Amino acid sequence: MESKELDFLEKVSEVLNDTNNIVELSNKLKTLLPLQSIKNINLYVYDAVTNTLRDCIQSWSILEDSSDIYKAYEDICKNDFIINSKTYKLPSAIGDIRLKISSLCIPMLKKEKLFGLMHLDFEENTSVNLEYLFLMKVFAAFISLKLQNIILNEQYNINMEFYDSMKNIAKIIETQYELNYIVPLIGEMLDRFISDHLIYVFLKHEEEFQLVWPKACKDERVYDALKELTPETDYVLINNDKIGAFPLVSDGEISGCIVARSTLEALSKRDISYLEQLTRQSAITISRANSYSKILQYATIDALTNLNNRRQFELRLGQEIATTKRQNTPLCAMMIDIDFFKKVNDTYGHACGDAVLRGVASIIKSTLRESDIPARYGGEEFAILLPYTHIEEAKIVGERLRAAVEDSPISIDSVANVDKIQVTISMGISEFNNSETGEELFERADKALYEAKSSGRNKVCTA
């Protein structure tokens, strides 16, 4: 081998040592190839997991079985090259032979088995000798080893991400136990890991699957897959394996389901294995959250009003702010005070005051959405979080709540010869911005509440 060829292989070796990105590798190799007439270089690898030939440079896209490259891959097994769409073997003795060439396919081997294909396109009227073909064979062997290392490294990173996802799903229960908070977290973790497929999380309520994350699923085939699930089902695959449903099973019963859906590729054996394990871990976490929630219910609920107590509300505030920042969604806070509540206590007694608190709490719960988070903040004060709500929408909710309290006399069980008493509320509303804390959010709502009370009460003011 001549010095210029050795010099070429040395430069190739330097590029391979310095580069771990396939697209960057391809671009650098183009500048090194010893023929200026090469137009393009492409690298293809056979994926044994999905039984497909993939284009390394074009985001690992799958080649159609009918493509010329796929046919070349099948034809090259027992040959050294495919030149101009014809198979070719190097002769035992390299003589002074030149070949006109427009395209060249070279096999890439892994432990003497076909691993992939290198494809070169040439300018018109290009000719090469046999020494050049031998050099390209050595070149392809170098590239094959590098691609194997890159793929192994990528698989290692995927495995690390998988175990991180498993660990993070398991750890959720250490700090959270409410399903309306932990299920979106699980959905987001799965969505990041299984990035080639859309992820849906369903929970079962009264024998019906209800979508919990994300907000919508318009593909009816997903719901068809849910109908096939049983507690004994490992998973269900439909639509040529592009939709997979994995049941969340707890104590022998289905508590929900995780669905992966793609419009492009089928779920691979590797994807299915990952999803099975992640689903099992999610089912354990959700089951523990349900049990833990029941245990902690009495420690987190205000006994008088059956709303969240202040401690629980502050925990939820931190969670909702984290969600708002992560998803870049709006969040509003309300501070509510019962007008002249001290006068109610002084006139009718504390038993009547308790009845008023229960009555106002009941109106709050019946007026708000399920996703809203009300709490008894202390004394006659209530606090409410309105996720996914802008200030204009929150003001409409606030006015509706204010009117509902004003129009709903509260039964006080014939205390002091009075069956019912009418009360009003004042309210301050603020919308969260990313530069503040939860405490600052409610300080602004509290200032707006003070404005409502000082300007006449029974009104809603915004910060």
Image (spheres, helix red, strand yellow):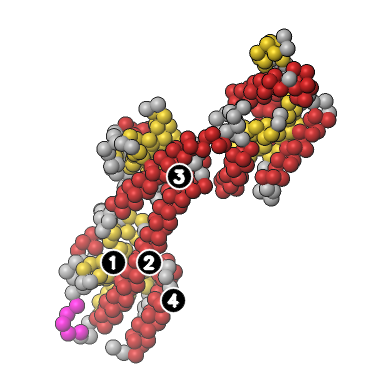
Region in magenta? 90-94
Cα separation between marks 2 and 1: 20 Å
Quadrant for the C terminus in the image: top right
Left or right: where does residue 336 sit relative to residue 155? right
- Is residue 174 shown in magenta? no
Q: Position of residue 64 (x, y in %)?
A: 29, 53
Q: Tell me the amino acid under the disc marked 3.
A: Gly
User: Across the whole image, how many numbered discs are drawn on residues?
Assistant: 4
Judging depth in this view, the residue of 98 and 383 nearest the camera is 383
The residue that mark 2 highlights is 153
Above or below, 458 against 110 in this view is: above
Q: Tell me the amino acid under the disc marked 2.
A: Asn
Check disc 1: other Cα within 10 Å, few if <14, some if 14-19, many if 20+: many
The residue that mark 1 highlights is 117
Cα separation between marks 3 and 4: 37 Å
Above or below, 341 against 77 in this view is: above
Check disc 2: other Cα within 10 Å, few if <14, some if 14-19, many if 20+: few
Secondary element type, mark 4? helix
Cα separation between marks 2 and 3: 26 Å
Q: Of discs 4 and 1, which sits in the foreground?
A: 4
Q: Of discs 2 and 3, which sits in the foreground?
A: 3
The residue that mark 4 highlights is 18
